Every structure is written in structure tokens, then in C-alpha cells.
């Protein structure tokens, strides 16, 4: 019987010829990622060794990545002290893939890993962050785990007792209309699946829309699969993956690619016609509360956030800058922009996007998670409504349980910044923006011809 | 036998159980003070020690969805709370097993705050309502970790028994 993409990866990583759903395996880990919650991992890791007389040494310091992003620069002395402890541990253990608070190589973990070539197709990646699902965009089996689980991985180099998950196949065909983005595809899918519709499962993406999408867009889609409960999302690697790895991530030797077997078994197949999608909005307070933008028209917002591991990449900034060029952020709206990494920040600076944002009245912030998790850099007031390109709108998520967070693409967020209310970017652009649609970053990505199903 | 002290709906996220703004606090000994802190009334009761250890939280589907933060599990074990839910989100379920939170998966559970609940022979008995509900066993793959008392002792046994 054929295997899905993730079954094949797990079989390889566990050193067995094949696996089926429900089998229990202990896959070797190729990369283990943590951020500030590394402080807890270190605590649990040391506890494992307590009283054993064995020195607490990580299994392979070159396979551990630690990125400071959730609280950068530190918002409190407590965080600063945690970060200091992590730095000391990194130095002692000889961990090499460390991204501190810096303007040359910092950023959000889910952008740092791909852009530095740490993610390879066909490998197993775990992270102490639920959006570790992102890296399935490059054909890895990549999933989130807790801190104690990570401590065990640091000790053993493998994940214990993993049950082989079932797979849902999602096929996306059709050309995305202008100003309808990968974010709108995944929001639409989450709305259909519900917040637990893919619980314990993997979502494998197929179809011409995905094939023609840049890695940047695929990262958006895989990032949010966890919002449907999925263990991970994955895109079988292809030409675009190789292009990204070589051109953007500086990888010299790309491993041999493999995809799922033609006769792989899927638990469910879902088809999406991208050509019929409108921009989508996730209403408060659950991510699966998704409606087309037309249902949100006129909702006044006080804060716009463009950024996060979902939509803080160069193509997001490009489309937003294009919409905002020569325009002003509405009075009474605070617009905050967080480039996902300092590399993207520098690219956006060169291309003039950041100047456009500032001239429009937006505040350009440092690379990092920003207010996404509600710690700092843009908390909401009681009664505020925010429209954000982030991935979660749970009660309290942006720092205040008495506020509301709506989620959208960067195009919808930028259009809404101008009007001060949730706005379909397509209606705004016909009269307001003269320049044409922004080409997505990847030069060799073709737009699918309209009219095909 | 113990009382249900908090009844919750579906999709209770880790942001509700343990808001992100308290994530700089990591140690299991320190996290309990922030359990359900945005539910001021319940959090106050916990801190006033008005909720006996062993009390139940009863929740709907997808309890613990969202972030991978382990604080959401350790803040509950700190008060000795137990959770019955229709089902649990994946990472939360694993974290809870790893840190030894007592959990019961009970898809048809009916219980209100104040009801007396008991788990006997794989069934949840609601003594107050005089009803019984089937439970779903926790993932078999994780049973060995539960039996060892959590992932730390389990991994410790592996490394001391010869590191592989
Ligand atoms: S940007 Fe938000 S969702 Fe992404 S890693 Fe940071 S806190 Fe998590």
C-alpha cells in the first residue's frame, strides 16, 4: 500500500521500510527549534539528568536552533534574564544555530529557519512552537511539541512514541484573483474544516495553485494548518522548493526530492477552487469563524498589524506598500508593521516599502513577533478592534481579553488601514490605486491562466 | 469523588488557560498563579485555596487548542486540578501526559458546576445527575510515559539504561 508524504518521511527517519496510520515510531530528529521558551526546555533538560551522575549534554549541538523572537528586545527584566540564561546554555553546549537580538540575522523563528537553509525536504523538524507546521512548505515533516518533549529530544535525538498520523489531501486549483492571497486560501480551508477538523492529522497540499505558488505563500498556508488542529501541513517539494533553497536560502546541495506514492491513502480529500475565492476574514474569537470580507465591510478598527510568522514576508510588505503608496492611514488608526526578519527588513528598506509605510503614517517596528502573542509592542485598549495579518484571534491574544482581533491578508489589512474599517482591497484599488497588482516576489512563478477549473 | 468546579465550552485555547503575556514565567512551581487569570473570579478562588485538589474542570471539544506552551498544563497540575473534555488538542494532550496532568476524554460528558464526578472502570459517573458516560482511552503510544509518571522520569530511565 502506498504511503503519504509524511508516512514516507517517518519511515525513513525511523529506519523502517514502511509505516501505516497508527503505527508507533521513534523518528530521528534532523532539527530541533526553540525560542525564548528554551528557558523551560533547559530547566526540564537539566531535570532529566538530575541524580543520574551523567553530564547533561545535548545529543547534537549542530541540530539545535534557538531564535529570540517572542520578546525582542526584552520587555521585562524577567525575560532579559531568561534570555541571558539561554545564551549561557548555548555557549556551554556549543549550539551553533543561534539567532540573538540583532539587526543582521534576527527575526521570527519560522522565517529564520527557511531563509537560512536550516529546513530541508524529507527531514523531520520539531519546534517548541505550534506554528512549526510552517516548514512543511519545504517538504519537511515539521510539528510543534512542548518543552518537556523537547528536553527529551535534546537528550535522545529522537521523538518518543509518535503515532503515525492520517493525512487529509487538499487540492487547490484555479488562479487566485487579484488581491486574493494564500492567506485567503488557508482561512477559507480552516473555516471549512473547523478548529478541530484536522486534529491529529496532516494536511498535504496539491493542485496547480500550490504548484504555482512561491515558497513564501506555501509557508503561509502550512503555518496556519495548526489552526484546524493539524499536526502539520506539507507541500510535496518541487522545482520551486529547489529554487528557494538555492537562490534564497543559500543551500548548495539540495537532497534528492521525493513525494507521496501515487496510491497513497488519504482519509479525506478536499477541493478548493481558488478562482472563486474572495478575501477572507476570521472573526473573533476563533480562527475558524471565517467569513468573506463582504460580511465584514464597515467594521471600524483602531489597530492594523502587518507582520508575524504568517504574513510578514517581503511579498506581504510589497503588496501592502503598493496599496498604501501616496495614501494615508486613517486618523484614529494605529498601523504597525513588523518585517518577519531583519533580512526582509533590509530588503524592504532598499525597495522603499518602509518609507512608503512611514509616509502613510504607519509605524515600522523591529523584526520579531510583536503584539501577536499579546506581550508588548501594541496591546489593545478595552473595546478596541484590530485587523491583523497574524494567525490567532483568541480572546486575550493581543494582550487584552476585552478587545477583538480580526485576521486577514496583508492586502486586506493595508486597504483597511486607509479607510479605518475592514475593506475589500479590490473595491479600494479600482478607484484609489493606479499601479497594477504587485507581482509576488518569485520571478519564475507563473500565474495560472484564468478560466480553468 | 470530587466536584466539577469550572465548566467551559468548546475550543478553549491556551490563551484562555494561560495568557501569552505571562509566558516569561516558566517554572512549574510558579505558573499556577496565572491559571485562568482572565477569569478573575476563578483565579481568585484558586489563590484563596477555595478549590480542593482533585477538583474537575469540565470542557467541550478541542480543549487546549493553540499555542504549544506547556505552562497551560503545568498551571493546572500545580493546583491538583483534573480535566474532563470531549477531546483535547494534540500538543496540549501530549504536554499534559508529559507533565502528569490527569485527563479524561469523554465525548458525551454532561456535567454542571457543582456536580460530583467519579471515574470508575473507564466510565465517568455523574453522581449528581445519576448518569454514566463512556471514556476514550488516552493514546496507547503514550501509556508507557503515563505509567512512568511523566516524560522526565521516562527519558531519565532511557539514558541511565544505556544511551542510544
Ligand atoms: S509571530 Fe505570533 S504565531 Fe508566529 S511564532 Fe511569533 S508569537 Fe507565534
Image (cartoon, rainbow, N blue to C red):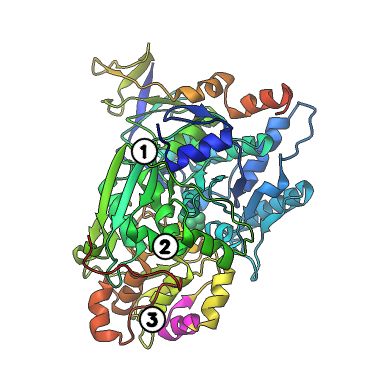
> In whole angstroms, how far apart are the C-alphas of marks 1 and 3?
44 Å
Tell me where residue A221 sits by quadrant.
bottom left
Residues tagged by mark 1 and mark 3 found on one chain of the structure: yes
Where disc 2 sits, the SS reads: helix
Q: Is residue A445 visible?
A: yes
User: In the rendering, at what x and y percent does residue B160 appear?
Assistant: 73, 24
Q: Are marks 2 and 3 on the same chain?
A: yes
Residue at 45% in and 84% down? A356
Q: Nearer the viewer, mark 1 or mark 3?
A: 1
What secondary structure predominates along the stretch shown in magenta? helix
Going from N to C along the chain, the mark reached first, 2 or 3, is 2
Which residue of the protein is positioned furthest toward the top in this rendering? B121
Q: Considering only vertical position in the picture, is A206 above or below B92?
A: below
Q: Which residues are magenta?
A: A353-363
Mark-to-mark CA distance, 2 and 3: 18 Å
> Which residue occupies 38% across, 39% down?
A167
User: Under tag 1, what secondary structure?
Assistant: loop
A78 or A344: nearer the eye? A344
Q: Residue A225 placed where, x, y %?
A: 39, 49
Are the residues tagged 1 and 3 within 8 Å (C-beta)?
no
Which image quarter holds the C terminus of chain A?
bottom left
In terms of depth relative to the viewer, which is nearer, A453 or A420? Answer: A453
Q: Which residue is mark 1?
A: A263
Query: What residue did someone put label 2 on?
Result: A217
Residue A354 magenta: yes
The residue tagged 3 is: A322
Label whose residue precedes the other's in the sequence (1 or 2): 2
Tell me the quarter of the picture where residue A147 sits.
top right
Is residue A405 at all visible to an observer of this figure? Answer: no
Amino acid at each position: 500500500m502506498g504511503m503519504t508524504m509524511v508516512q514516507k518521511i517517518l519511515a525513513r527517519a525511523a529506519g523502517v521500510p514502511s509505516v501505516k496510520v497508527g503505527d508507533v515510531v521513534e523518528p530521528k530528529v534532523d532539527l530541533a527549534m526553540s525560542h525564548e521558551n528554551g528557558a523551560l526546555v533547559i530547566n526540564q533538560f537539566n531535570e532529566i539528568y538530575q541524580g543520574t551522575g551523567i553530564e547533561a549534554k545535548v545529543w547534537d549541538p549542530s541540530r539545535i536552533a534557538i531564535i529570540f523572537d517572542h520578546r525582542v528586545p526584552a520587555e521585562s527584566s524577567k525575560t532579559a534574564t531568561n534570555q541571558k540564561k539561554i545564551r549561557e546554555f548555548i555557549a556551554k553546549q556549543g549550539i551553533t544555530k543561534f539567532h540573538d537580538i540583532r539587526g543582521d540575522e534576527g527575526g521570527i523563528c519560522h522565517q529564520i529557519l527557511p531563509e537560512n537553509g536550516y529546513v530541508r525536504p524529507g527531514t523531520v523538524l520539531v519546534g517548541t512552537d505550534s506554528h512549526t507546521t510552517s516548514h512543511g512548505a519545504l517538504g519537511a515533516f515539521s510539528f510543534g511539541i512542548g518543552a518537556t518533549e523537547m528536553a527529551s529530544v535534546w537528550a535522545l535525538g529522537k521523538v518518543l512514541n509518535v503515532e503515525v498520523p492520517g493525512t487529509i489531501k487538499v487540492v487547490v486549483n484555479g488562479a487566485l484573483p487579484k488581491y486574493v492571497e494564500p492567506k485567503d486560501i488557508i482561512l477559507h480551508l480552516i473555516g471549512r474544516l473547523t478548529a478541530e477538523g484536522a486534529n491529529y492529522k496532516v494536511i498535504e497540499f496539491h493542485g496547480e495553485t500550490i504548484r504555482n505558488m512561491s515558497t513564501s505563500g506555501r509557508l503561509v498556508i502550512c503555518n496556519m494548518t495548526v489552526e484546524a488542529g493539524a499536526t502539520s501541513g506539507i507541500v510535496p517539494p518541487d522545482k520551486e522548493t529547489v529554487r528557494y533553497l538555492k537562490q534564497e536560502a543559500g543551500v548548495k546541495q539540495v537532497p534528492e526530492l521525493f513525494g507521496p506514492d501515487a496510491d497513497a491513502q488519504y482519509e479525506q480529500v478536499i477541493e478548493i477552487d481558488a478562482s472563486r475565492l474572495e478575501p477572507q476574514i476570521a472573526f473573533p474569537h476563533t480562527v475558524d469563524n471565517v467569513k468573506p470580507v463582504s460580511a465584514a465591510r464597515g467594521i471600524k478598527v483602531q489597530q492594523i498589524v502587518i507582520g508575524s510568522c504568517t504574513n510578514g514576508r517581503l511579498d506581504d510588505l510589497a503588496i501592502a506598500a503598493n496599496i498604501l503608496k501616496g495614501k494615508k492611514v486613517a486618523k484614529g488608526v494605529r498601523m504597525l508593521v513588523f518585517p518577519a526578519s531583519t533580512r526582509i527588513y533590509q530588503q524592504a528598506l532598499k525597495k522603499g516599502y518602509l518609507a512608503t509605510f512611514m509616509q502613510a503614517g504607519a509605524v515600522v517596528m523591529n523584526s520579531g513577533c510583536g503584539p501577536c502573542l499579546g506581550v508588548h509592542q501594541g496591546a489593545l485598549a478595552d473595546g478596541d478592534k484590530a485587523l491583523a495579518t497574524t494567525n490567532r484571534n483568541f480572546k486575550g491574544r493581543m494582550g487584552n481579553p476585552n478587545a477583538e482581533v480580526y485576521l486577514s491578508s496583508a492586502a486586506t489589512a493595508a486597504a483597511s488601514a486607509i479607510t479605518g474599517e475592514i475593506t475589500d482591497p479590490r473595491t479600494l484599488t479600482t478607484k484609489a490605486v493606479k499601479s497594477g497588482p504587485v507581482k509576488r516576489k518569485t520571478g519564475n512563478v507563473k500565474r495560472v491562466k484564468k478560466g480553468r477549473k | 469523588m470530587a466536584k466539577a468546579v469550572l465548566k467551559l465550552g468548546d475550543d478553549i485555547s491556551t490563551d484562555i488557560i494561560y495568557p501569552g503575556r505571562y509566558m516569561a514565567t516558566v517554572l512549574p512551581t510558579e505558573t499556577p498563579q496565572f491559571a485562568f487569570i482572565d477569569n478573575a473570579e476563578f483565579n481568585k478562588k484558586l489563590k484563596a485555596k477555595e478549590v480542593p485538589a482533585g477538583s474537575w474542570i469540565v470542557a467541550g471539544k478541542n480543549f487546549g487548542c493553540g499555542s504549544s506552551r506547556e505552562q497551560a498544563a503545568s498551571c493546572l497540575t500545580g493546583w491538583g486540578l483534573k480535566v474532563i473534555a470531549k477531546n483535547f488538542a494534540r500538543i496540549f494532550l501530549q504536554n499534559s501526559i508529559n507533565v502528569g496532568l490527569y485527563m479524561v476524554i469523554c465525548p458525551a460528558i454532561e456535567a454542571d458546576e457543582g456536580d460530583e464526578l467519579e471515574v470508575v472502570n473507564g466510565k465517568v459517573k455523574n453522581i449528581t445527575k445519576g448518569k454514566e458516560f463512556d471514556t476514550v482511552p488516552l493514546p496507547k503510544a503514550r501509556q508507557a510515559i503515563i505509567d512512568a509518571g511523566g516524560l522526565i522520569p521516562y527519558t531519565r530511565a532511557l539514558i541511565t539504561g544505556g544511551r542510544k
